[in-house]
Amino acid sequence: MNPRSTVRRTSAFQANALGHYATPPHKAILVAPFSAILSSLGYNQVMKLVIFAGGTGTRLWPLSRKNFPKQFIKMFNNKSTLQLAVDRVKKPFGLNNIIISTNEAYVSMTKSEVPEIPVSNIVGEPEKRDVAPAVGLNLMRLKKQGYKGPVALLWADHLITNIAGYLELLKTSEDFVRKNPTKMVFVGEKPRFADNNIGWIKIGGELTDKGFYAYKSWKYKPDFDACADMYKSGEWVWNSGYVVEDLDFALSLFETLQPELFSGLRRIYDALGTSKESQVVKEVYPKLPKVSHDNAISEKVTGDQAVVFLADIGFSDPGTLYVLKKALESDESANVEVGLTSLSDSHDTMVFNKEVGKLVAGIGLDGMVIVNTKDAVLVVPKNKVLGVSKFVEALAVDPKLKKFI
């Protein structure tokens, strides 16, 4: 019972709107070196990586707050998940090829967290309009800069234990997209348990390209019973959220599947690099349809437009407090204690104490999560942590309590 203070354990757009859609490089691979072909077609040698870091992390409240969201919290070896996301890819891909997209309010914080990233590669979204507009904005910026080739969409709040496997899947997916520019690659993770906090992808048979599987369908956050059946079937895999796709093909999907959103993005594209850029972005972006990339694009693509790369990279998305507990400790029955804490006769419980000089103690707890900060305390059973986000929404509309979000 000693108190502890450490952790345990092809379209009109492609052809006309903004230029061209070059002949895929694999068509000429027999007559010239691959790198020479890419160069002659204007393709960059290194894939661009866009790391999205604009979320507010309400499901991790009160650890994560509106003015200091989860991607900036140093919870893993004194590093934030944003720092870890950059660390994983900066050496093999280079800092100039990493773009971080975040809310305008977090640009300064982002610069402080990852000062090695060029300032011009930190994109501030003027308003929170969900992921699809953010993806579209970054694709248009790359298009305006003259980039051609694969783009990887990555996330700032994930954990990866198999870094070598992660880098391999990015390179393998990049090579696949260069050869198959009209197919997007979803990265699926071999599921370790029935996680109903994330999306799932149904896969078909393995393709001739090793590691790639046919794409069948998509299900976002299934209920627990359905999730358990999907896990047992062996036909479904976790959706990591990572996508690798050709820039022009990605924009053609926006044009075809989300014409209203694309129209607004096109207005922004026309203004990029001009004296009206800031004005137009601030005017147009907040009016773009508020929609997730999953709903806008991913769920609408067909089996002949996408494939799945099946990975085993120790992926986890600590998007809820209990998933965070499992990320910190693989043994489900074990406790996780952070800060000055003491637990007795307790199992499968996480206590996260952020307040210096105060002891948080528990007796006879099983499957509980306790978070103590200087201005808020949360106590919640593990099977109720999905309700934290709605709880925070209720706080946000309460005049007396909204200051705590």
Image (spheres, rainbow, N blue to C red):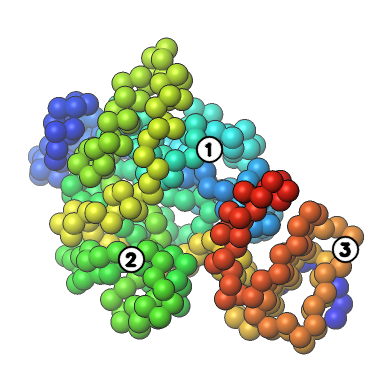
Which residue, given by chain and number where applicable, does mark 2 sit on? Answer: 219
Q: Secondary structure at mark 3?
A: loop
Which residue, given by chain and number where applicable, does mark 3 sit on? Answer: 358
Q: Position of residue 302 (x, y in %)?
A: 18, 57
- Is residue 87 visible in the rendered image? The answer is no
Query: Which residue is at a point 21% across and 71% down the rendered structure image?
Result: 204
Which residue, given by chain and number where applicable, does mark 1 sit on? Answer: 103
Residue type of the residue flagged with mark 1: Asn
Q: Secondary structure at mark 2?
A: strand
Label 1, residues with CA under 10 Å away: few <14, some 14-19, many ≥20: many
Query: Which residue is at a point 41% across and 15% down the rendered structure image?
Result: 276
Label 2, residues with CA under 10 Å away: few <14, some 14-19, many ≥20: some
Query: Which residue is at a point 14% across and 38% down the rendered structure image?
Result: 11
User: Which of the two labelled residues, at mark 2 and mark 3, occupies the earlier sequence position?
Assistant: 2
The image quarter containing residue 261 is top left
Query: Which residue is at a point 35% across and 70% down the rendered structure image?
Result: 237
Residue type of the residue flagged with mark 2: Lys
- Is residue 370 visible in the rendered image? The answer is yes
